[in-house]
Image (cartoon, rainbow, N blue to C red):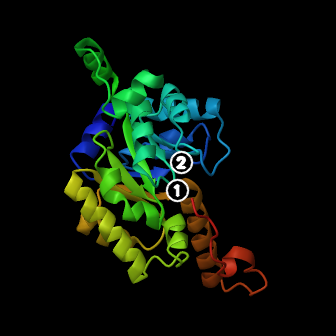
Amino acid sequence: MNAIELTTALRERRQIFGTLIVSQATRWPKAVSQLGLDFVFIDTEHTSIDRHELSCMCNTYEGIGLAPIVRISEPDAYEACRVLDGGAAGIIAPYVESVEEVRTLAGAVKYKPLKGEKLTRLLNGEDTISPASRAYLESKSSHALIVNIESEPAISRLDEILSVAELDGVVIGPHDLSINLGIPEDYGNPLFKQAVTKVIEKSKQYGKSAGIHFWGDIDLEIDWIKEGMNLIIHSSDLRSFAASIQSDLKRIHQKAQLSESAASGAIGGQKLDINI
């Protein structure tokens, strides 16, 4: 899936799956290519990936047919442009709470390289562009624009946010949203489920994709998919590695009947503290 196919799938609300990739190991892309994913999610908000490393990752995954969606560190138009210049197929902007933020990002993602006062007036409906300029910009606007919904203010302003024509979809950030709602990591809480359902229903109403980056109970993911969620970022390479090794070692200790002293640390049942 390339950038055009990704944006088309989002606009058509087709079911697509990805995972968060943290590792930059050179053999990692080959392994990831065998997982049946449609895209990869690369996060620069909570990781130390620099601009050069990010560009290498984006172009590698794009080259093997997995569209790279990058979360920028803040809802900033210039950062969005830099990420797209580096090879991203689309961006996710974190903790967006206002329609103004979405419009600014729309300018960077959908009207690049138009900038400055001309772009501001255009986004505000105060100016127009020539037919030639519009045709040129439309030919270049293959990148996807997605924003994170991670707070109660964002939930309350969903109609405004989703009404921005250039927006392709929204993705729930469950960790931050649960904390903002006062129910930290309680993803089965009716209050959290109600918020997720509202995002799904509002997104369907406006013809936008609705997604979540989730690493918890798979049954919850399945329930949300049945409700109409179509953009799934499932877990991460880091978390899946840790959970798999933890599970395997615990089973080995139990089956081999090793002493309790040998089953220490995470093997002893420690909860994984990995929220990416």
Task: Decide if residue 34 is in sight here.
Answer: no
Residue at horizontal 27 percent and vertical 50 percent from the top: 208
Judging by the rendered image, the residue that carries numbered circle 1 is 236
Within 10 Å of the Cα at label 2, are there few (<14), some (14-19), or many (20+) other Cα atoms?
many
In the picture, the quarter occupied by the C terminus is bottom right
Q: Position of residue 107 (x, y in %)?
A: 41, 32
Give the labeled residue for mark 2.
Answer: 21
> Is 15 drawn above or below residue 28 in the view shown?
below
Q: Is residue 178 above or below residue 18?
A: below
> Residue 45 in the image: x percent, y percent?
60, 48
The N terminus, quarter of image: top left
**For residue 265, what is the image quadrant?**
bottom right
Callout 1 amino acid: Ser
- The reply to whether dot 1 and dot 2 touch (C-beta < 8 Å) is yes
Kind of residue indicated by mark 2: Ile
| Label 1: how many Cα within 10 Å (few below 14, some 14–19, many 20+) | many
Upstream in sequence: badge 1 or badge 2: 2
Q: Is residue 47 left or right of residue 168?
A: right
User: In this orientation, which residue lies closer to the viewer: 276 or 83?
Assistant: 83
The residue under the point 47% across, 52% down is 96
Residue 173, numbered circle:
none
Nearer to the camera, 46 or 164: 164
| CA distance separating discs 1 and 2 | 6 Å
Res 174 seen here? yes
Q: Residue at x 37, y 53 (%)?
A: 170
**Residue at the farthest front position:** 126
Q: Position of residue 140 (x, y in %)?
A: 34, 22
Please state if 204 lies on the left or on the right of 137 as rendered. left
